[in-house]
């Protein structure tokens, strides 16, 4: 399967290629995300000190951090139904950015890719 068709990969403008995990992905917040009942959002977490909202989406292993997000906006998101429509309005605000979060599944996929490349190189060395 091509990387751009794989739901675990995304386009990284910093690396200028399709990646699953890269240096531009951020570590997860050191908080527990709370499960929510929404069609597109599985769980939410908010770091009040840093103004970062961490959202785990229902498709594949997609977790993103949005910033800066004010505490009042986070409370409005929790009360909104459906949440994903309110999130869309938040994203339309100028200045709210997001970063992909490094997850265990993404780490495993990238390690498997590296192992595959190494095995391919070693296979080529033995036949030469």
Image (cartoon, rainbow, N blue to C red):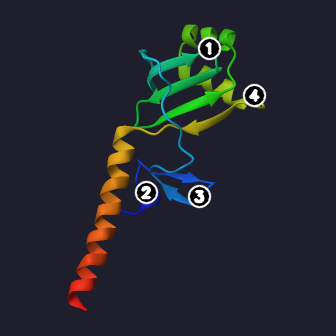
Tell me residue 14's x, y (percent): 63, 54
Which residue position is annotated with label 1? 48
Identify the secondary structure beneath mark 3.
loop
Q: Does the residue at mark 4 contact the one at mark 3 (Cβ under 8 Å)?
A: no
Q: Do the residues labelled 1 and 3 touch (CB within 8 Å)?
A: no
Query: Which residue is labeled 3 in the image?
Result: 15
Dot 1 falls on a residue whose secondary structure is loop
Q: How far apart are marks 2 and 4 (CA)?
A: 29 Å
Q: Earlier in the sequence, mark 1 or mark 4?
A: 1
For label 1, the crowd category at 10 Å Cα-Cα, with few meaning under 14, some 14 to 19 and many 20 or more, is few
Front of the two marks 2 and 3: 3
Neighbor class of circle 2 (other Cα within 10 Å; few <14, some 14-19, many 20+) is few
User: Of label 1 and label 3, which has the lower sequence position?
Assistant: 3
Residue that lies at the very extreme toward the right in this rendered image? 94
Marks 4/3: CA distance? 26 Å
Callout 3 crowding tier (Cα within 10 Å): few <14, some 14–19, many ≥20: few
Give the residue number, with chain letter if any, for mark 4: 93
Q: How far apart are marks 1 and 3 (CA)?
A: 30 Å
> Answer yes or no: do the residues labelled 1 and 2 have beta carbons within 8 Å?
no
Q: Residue 5 carries which label?
A: 2
Quarter placement of the C terminus: bottom left
Asked where in the image residue 95 lies, by quadrant, the reply is top right
| Structural distance between the alpha carbons of marks 1 and 4 | 19 Å
Question: Cβ–Cβ below 8 Å for labels 2 and 3?
Answer: no
* Sequence-wise first label, 1 or 2: 2
């Amino acid at each position: 399967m091509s990387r751009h068709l794989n739901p675990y990969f995304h386009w990284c403008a910093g690396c200028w290629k399709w990646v699953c995990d890269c240096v531009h992905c951020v570590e997860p917040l050191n908080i527990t995300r709370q499960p929510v009942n929404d069609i597109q959002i599985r769980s939410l977490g908010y770091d009040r000190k840093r103004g970062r909202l961490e959202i785990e989406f229902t498709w594949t292993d997609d977790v993103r951090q949005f910033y800066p997000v004010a505490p009042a906006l986070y409370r409005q998101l929790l009360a909104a139904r459906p949440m994903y429509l309110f999130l869309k309005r938040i994203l339309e605000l100028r200045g709210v950015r997001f970063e992909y979060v490094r997850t265990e599944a993404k780490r495993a996929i990238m390690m498997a890719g590296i192992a595959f490349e190494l095995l391919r190189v070693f296979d080529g060395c033995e036949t030469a």
